[in-house]
Image (tube, helix red, strand yellow):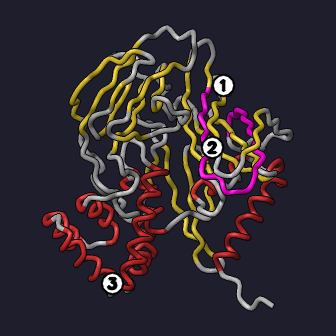
Amino acid sequence: MLKFISMKFLYSLCTIFLIFLNGFIANAQSLDSLDLSFKYYQGKGFEYESRIFVTENETRKAILFVQLTNLSSSERDVAFSTSAHIDLDEKVPDQINYQNNYVLKGGESLHLQLEQELTDDQNWVFLSMRINNLMYPDLFLVGERFIFNSPSAYPSLNGSDDKTNTYFKEGDELTFNTFHESTDIDSILVYQLKYDFKPAYPPMFETFNQNEGGPENLSTTQIGIAQPFRLDSAGLYQYKDSEESMKAQGFRVEKSYFPKLQTVEGIIGPLRYISSNKEYNELDSLKSKKALDQFFLNAFGSPGRAKPKIKLYFNRVAKANYYFTNYKEGWKTDQGMLYIILGSPTNIKKDGNYEIWSYKKGLNSKLSFTFVQVKDPYSGYHFVLIRKDEYQNDWFKAIDAWRGR
């Protein structure tokens, strides 16, 4: 007889049950009640990435790239469906027509392009993924008030089927490809920019200077469509159809080991979230392994206690980079900061151009954070946290838990 069942097992079982239940009740739900938290849950048995572009050729259209990787060993039946909606108070479609069906074995990957026509008043694309009869939903804001229309081409790693990239690596070779064969464009402008991004401010800082200055243009290159383009330098890049075009997107170029961090200077950066001003300024000025080791001992106690906490912390940093890198490194974004300190949210919902993350807080309460999706010339995925003074006590408790106080 089993006398002990781990809390981790119970949590995984409950999560799987809720996702399974979601597949049966989804059709009675409104879109704004769907839980999207599976994207960051580590026990789902696969990694999901997506990227959406809005184009205007003969019709307004959403181009959605989807990638599934790291599938667990079991065989999976996978199907996809999309639909367009005006508002989130609309119901999930009564009949979800899954037109893209695949059978994937453990370890296989899937790269998919989906297209959804849009009318001028449709602001949302609903993606339904069915994996072994479980439904995994996602929602994309495509209203012109909130995101820039995409340039006529998109970047992808040369020779790769993955088109969801928001970052590439130094030395990578990419190509720009058009969404439509009829597109009348033969080249695209690529700008390499210098932009000094700071780590996110804590969630209780209601007033602070968010202005990080304007970007400095280091170079401008005209790249032919489908012409290989080598990325020799790390940093921020933006691409446009032409100098005058208002349609723009961006991506980052990082070191080969990204989303992990390897250098002393790189490791120091994310420690801003669990260090005092004095500690961080000292680390930042010395930039030495000796100072870093001393900080870990001071923060976490003995080497035996420090090792697992350091491993967990920087695993979360790497995941934050993987999930949230857009024109900033993922760990510097507001979402990345919360993910590093608090982990995966237990619930994610959309409400207009807001995204609400909730965490369990005791048995009968929760801690919620609201992000607003902002219109940005580098990314359609940039979310800014609405900061509140009321977060102070919970935030300091979370920091103290990391430091074992």
Q: Is residue 376 left or right of residue 283?
A: right
- Amino acid beneath label 1: Leu
Label 3 and label 2: CA atoms lie apart by 39 Å
Q: Residues within 10 Å of mark 2 (few under 14, many from 20)?
A: some
Up the image or down, 235 lies above or below 199; here it is: above
Secondary element under disc 3, as helix, strand or loop, is helix
157, 244: nearer the viewer: 157
User: Which portion, as a residue range, is magenta?
Assistant: 62-87
- Residue 65 belongs to the span the image colors magenta: yes
Label 1 and label 2: CA atoms lie apart by 29 Å
**The N terminus is located in which quarter?**
bottom right
The prevailing secondary structure element of the residues shown in magenta is strand
Residue linked to disc 3: 303
Q: Using the image, tell me which numbered label, if any, was put on residue 109.
A: 2
Secondary element under disc 1, as helix, strand or loop, is loop
- Amino acid beneath label 3: Pro
Secondary element under disc 2, as helix, strand or loop, is loop
360, 90: nearer the viewer: 360
Q: Is residue 51 left or right of residue 312?
A: right
Q: Using the image, tell me which numbered label, if any, was put on residue 70.
A: none
User: Nearer the viewer's eye, disc 1 or disc 2?
Assistant: 2
Q: Residues within 10 Å of mark 1 (few under 14, many from 20)?
A: many
Is residue 41 among what the camera can see? yes
At a point 53% along the width and 11% down the height, the residue shown is 183
At a point 46% along the width and 51% down the height, the residue shown is 322
Q: Which image quarter: residue 304?
A: bottom left
Label 1 and label 3: CA atoms lie apart by 57 Å
At a point 45% along the width and 10% down the height, the residue shown is 185
Residue linked to disc 1: 118
**The C terminus is located in which quarter?**
bottom left
Asked if marks 1 and 2 touch (Cβ < 8 Å), the reply is no
